[in-house]
Image (cartoon, grey):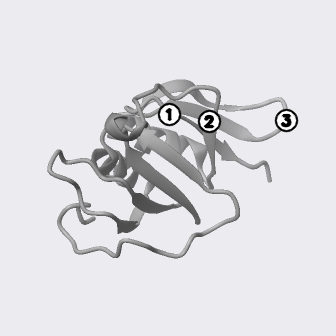
């Protein structure tokens, strides 16, 4: 798995899926590296970091879709705020393996894998950037 900073990447890539989450995080390049380790993401494109190490755009492919990231830029009206009121859902073939991988990468386990009342196997984690991820394994 290559590091975000080690390879020359395009600054733009085609979007996968219909609705794309765009996260502002404190450390977009570090978050991209975490998402590679925790969720098997790959970096599709990125704008090189500025002198402060911030990137205004990182485009990831995760689980067949696109996820975009940016650092906060308070000097341009994008002050740091904590994530709230949403979670990102990954449909996975093995919720226990996905949960274990995320926790071993540094995510906080919130809801351990379990069969839910709607029939699916489900778990939740919070990544080091405060984003909640729901892991869902559909029932057969």
Element class at badge 1: loop
In front: mark 1 or mark 3?
1
| Marks 1 & 2, CB-CB < 8 Å contact | yes
Please name the residue shown 50% across and 33% down the image: 131
| Marks 2 & 3, CB-CB < 8 Å contact | no
30 relative position to 61: left or right? left
In the picture of the structure, the residue carrying the numbered disc 2 is 87
User: Gap between marks 2 and 3, in whole Å?
Assistant: 18 Å
In the picture of the structure, the residue carrying the numbered disc 3 is 118
Few, some or many C-alpha atoms within 10 Å of disc 2 (few <14, some 14-19, many ≥20)? some
Please name the residue shown 36% across and 71% down the image: 11
The circle on residue 4 is none
Earlier-in-chain disc, 1 versus 2: 2
Q: Give above or below for 4 relative to 138.
A: below
Q: Position of residue 76 (x, y in %)?
A: 37, 41
Which of 137 and 129 lies nearest the eye of the viewer?
Answer: 129
> Which quadrant of the structure image shows residue 102?
top left
Element class at badge 2: strand
In the picture of the structure, the residue carrying the numbered disc 1 is 131
Q: Position of residue 51 (x, y in %)?
A: 14, 50
115 relative position to 99: left or right? right
Residue lying farthest front? 76
Please name the residue shown 17% across and 66% down the image: 6
Earlier-in-chain disc, 1 versus 3: 3
Q: Give above or below for 66 relative to 113.
A: below
Few, some or many C-alpha atoms within 10 Å of disc 3 (few <14, some 14-19, many ≥20)? few
Earlier-in-chain disc, 2 versus 3: 2
Please name the residue shown 40% across and 48% down the image: 70
User: Gap between marks 1 and 3, in whole Å?
Assistant: 24 Å
Image quadrant containing the N terminus:
bottom left
Number of numbered labels in the structure image: 3
């Amino acid at each position: 798995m290559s590091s975000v900073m080690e390879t020359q990447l395009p600054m733009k890539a085609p979007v996968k899926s219909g609705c794309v989450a765009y996260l502002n995080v404190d450390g977009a390049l570090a978050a991209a590296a975490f998402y590679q380790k925790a969720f098997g993401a790959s970096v599709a494109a990125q704008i090189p970091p500025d002198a402060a190490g911030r990137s205004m755009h990182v485009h990831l492919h995760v689980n067949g879709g696109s996820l975009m990231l940016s650092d906060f830029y308070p000097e341009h009206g994008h002050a740091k705020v904590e994530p709230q009121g949403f979670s990102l859902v990954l449909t996975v073939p093995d919720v226990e393996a996905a949960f274990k991988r995320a926790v071993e990468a540094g995510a906080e386990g919130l809801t351990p894998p379990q069969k839910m009342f709607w029939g699916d196997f489900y778990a939740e984690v919070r990544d080091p950037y405060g984003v909640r991820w729901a892991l869902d394994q559909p029932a057969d």
